[in-house]
Image (cartoon, rainbow, N blue to C red):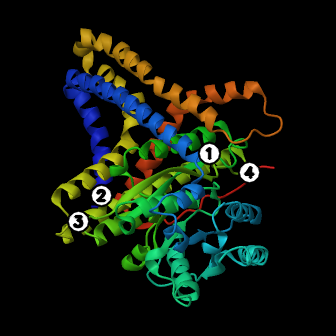
């Protein structure tokens, strides 16, 4: 099953080339229809993006602590909730980690309900240990509990990365804090954040409200919108566009909860973590895998509930421009490695006979289609549209269809560009407080930089996805281990 994603991707490219030679007219019609599909998809994207944005603005303007205290269903029950907050780190700078802890302190939610763990890796050495010590000394009295854990290196059956570290942290939190205090698992919500994640003041308020008002709170994950904006004024244009593109994609996904899978920073019931035995320790894509673990464990009775509320993370930034470009590619390739979940899901579905067939088919199609589109769509739009003309021979090139193919595709894609205009305009509204030296003409520069979108979709979208899925198929030494995105802040 690990071969399947790459087989579909390379099969698509080979078929496009072969059929452009054999039946160029058929491929030309397919390209036109595909471009129409792409146009409709941009309309779909823009409609759902606008809907999600309106809900997000409304949630940002709501006083959620006040709402918790006012509603009959939540005004007493929310006070008995506890929040386990897991912050796995690698070798991030002390200033990055400290800023995250300060944002936790700025939450308007009672901090005595926060059970915080900062998870270090043994292999990162003394510098990370020193960061942990400094964080503990500064914030040890700020929360209901703060522990610093160190994940041992080279444990059998583990792959180094977030997944094994998070499992270690969650288990240590249970041993050191939860069980000794006899806290009920079903009243604990676990939130796992990248160590550069900065929460907005009402995050835990909206999380508690959603948990208490959801129909099946113990059978649900809770997904905020990742805003890659912490350092948005410091990053190169390509990194900024990719960061905003990711933000808009996840914002749009909030309006299609039936397809929503947990990503990066998210929350879930601690009881569910106990039931599944925490995160799998030998994988890379732990954020989406934990969703599928729960889906299988509870016989399909699991979903992701959108919060329509943001958390802010870093856009990709290295110490040099080309270092940033390389890191962008590696980060996208790591995310695309989530195709490893296809083999897990298909195998688990085969073994679990209690999950309804319709639900199995739904998730099989969505996960396959999602990774296939990631790797192929932009190349089919921007690169393969001319294949029938080049390979169809003189007999096809003199036809009316061949003559009009470039014009038709250009008209359709020009119409589809309104989606880029929509996202470009919205990106200006999402910018954080402007730094000193930011002038009016910078808005214009930020707006026109969206013309780089075709590059980002292909070079930092399709290419790393093809890379990841091909490595997964070939396996061996080409398999990816967890790659930690370096967190660097400009000066």
The location of residue 257, given as percent across then percent down, is 37, 50
Real-space Cα distance between discs 1 and 2? 28 Å
| Residue 325 numbered tag | 1
Image side of residue 463 versus residue 201, left or right: left
Q: Residue at x 59, y 38 (%)?
A: 241
Q: Which residue is mark 4?
A: 319
Q: Which residue is mark 2?
A: 3
Q: Are marks 2 and 3 in contact (CB under 8 Å)?
A: no
Q: Secondary structure at mark 2?
A: loop
Q: Of the residues tagged 2 and 3, which is closer to the observer?
A: 3
Question: In front: 191, or 62?
Answer: 62
- The quarter holding residue 425 reads top right
Q: Are marks 3 and 4 in contact (CB under 8 Å)?
A: no
Real-space Cα distance between discs 1 and 3? 38 Å
Q: Tag 1: Cα neighbours inside 10 Å, few (<14), some, or many (≥20)?
A: some
Q: Which residue is mark 3?
A: 349
Q: Are marks 1 and 3 in contact (CB under 8 Å)?
A: no
Q: Tag 2: Cα neighbours inside 10 Å, few (<14), some, or many (≥20)?
A: some
Mark toward the start of the polypeptide (1 vs 3):
1
């Amino acid at each position: 099953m690990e071969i399947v994603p790459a087989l579909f991707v390379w099969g698509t490219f080979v078929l496009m080339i072969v059929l452009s030679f054999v039946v160029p007219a058929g491929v030309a019609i397919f390209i036109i229809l595909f471009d129409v599909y792409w146009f409709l998809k941009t309309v779909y994207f823009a409609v759902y993006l606008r809907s999600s944005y309106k809900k997000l603005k409304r949630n940002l303007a709501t006083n959620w602590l006040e709402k918790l205290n006012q509603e009959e269903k939540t005004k007493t029950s929310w006070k008995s909730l506890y929040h386990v907050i897991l912050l796995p780190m690698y070798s991030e700078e002390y200033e990055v980690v400290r800023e995250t802890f300060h944002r936790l302190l700025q939450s308007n939610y009672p901090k005595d309900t926060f059970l915080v763990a900062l998870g270090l890796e043994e292999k990162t050495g003394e510098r990370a240990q020193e960061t942990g010590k400094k964080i503990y000394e500064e914030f040890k009295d700020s929360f209901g509990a703060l522990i610093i854990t160190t994940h041992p290196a080279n444990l059998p059956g583990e792959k180094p990365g977030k997944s094994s570290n998070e499992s270690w942290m969650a288990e240590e939190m249970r041993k050191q804090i939860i069980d000794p205090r006899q806290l009920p698992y079903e009243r604990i919500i676990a939130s796992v954040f990248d160590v550069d994640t900065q929460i907005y003041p009402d995050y835990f308020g909206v999380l508690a409200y959603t948990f208490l008002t959801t129909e099946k709170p113990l059978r649900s994950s809770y997904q905020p919108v990742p805003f890659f904006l912490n350092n948005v004024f410091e990053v190169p244009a390509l990194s900024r566009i990719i960061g905003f593109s990711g933000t808009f994609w996840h914002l749009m996904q909030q309006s299609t909860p039936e397809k929503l899978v947990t990503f990066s920073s998210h929350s879930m019931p601690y009881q569910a973590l106990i039931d599944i035995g925490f995160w799998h320790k030998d994988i890379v894509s732990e954020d989406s895998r934990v969703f599928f673990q729960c889906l299988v464990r509870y016989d399909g009775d699991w979903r992701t509930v959108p919060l329509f509320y943001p958390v802010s993370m870093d856009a990709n930034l290295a110490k040099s421009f080309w270092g940033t470009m390389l890191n962008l590619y590696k980060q996208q390739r790591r995310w695309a490695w989530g195709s490893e979940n296809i083999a897990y899901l298909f195998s688990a579905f085969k073994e679990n006979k209690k999950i309804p067939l319709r639900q199995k088919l739904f998730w099989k199609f969505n996960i396959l289609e999602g990774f296939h589109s990631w790797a192929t769509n932009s190349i089919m739009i921007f690169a393969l549209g001319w294949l029938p003309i080049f390979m169809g021979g003189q007999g096809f090139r003199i036809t009316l269809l061949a003559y009009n193919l470039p014009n038709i595709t250009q008209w359709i894609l020009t119409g589809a560009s309104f989606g880029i205009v929509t996202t470009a305009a919205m990106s200006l509204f999402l910018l954080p407080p402007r730094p000193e030296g930011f002038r009016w003409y910078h808005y214009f520069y930020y707006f026109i930089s969206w013309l780089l979108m075709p590059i980002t979709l292909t070079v930092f979208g399709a290419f790393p996805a093809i890379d990841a899925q091909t490595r997964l198929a070939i396996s061996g030494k080409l398999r990816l281990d967890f790659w930690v995105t370096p967190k660097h802040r400009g000066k």
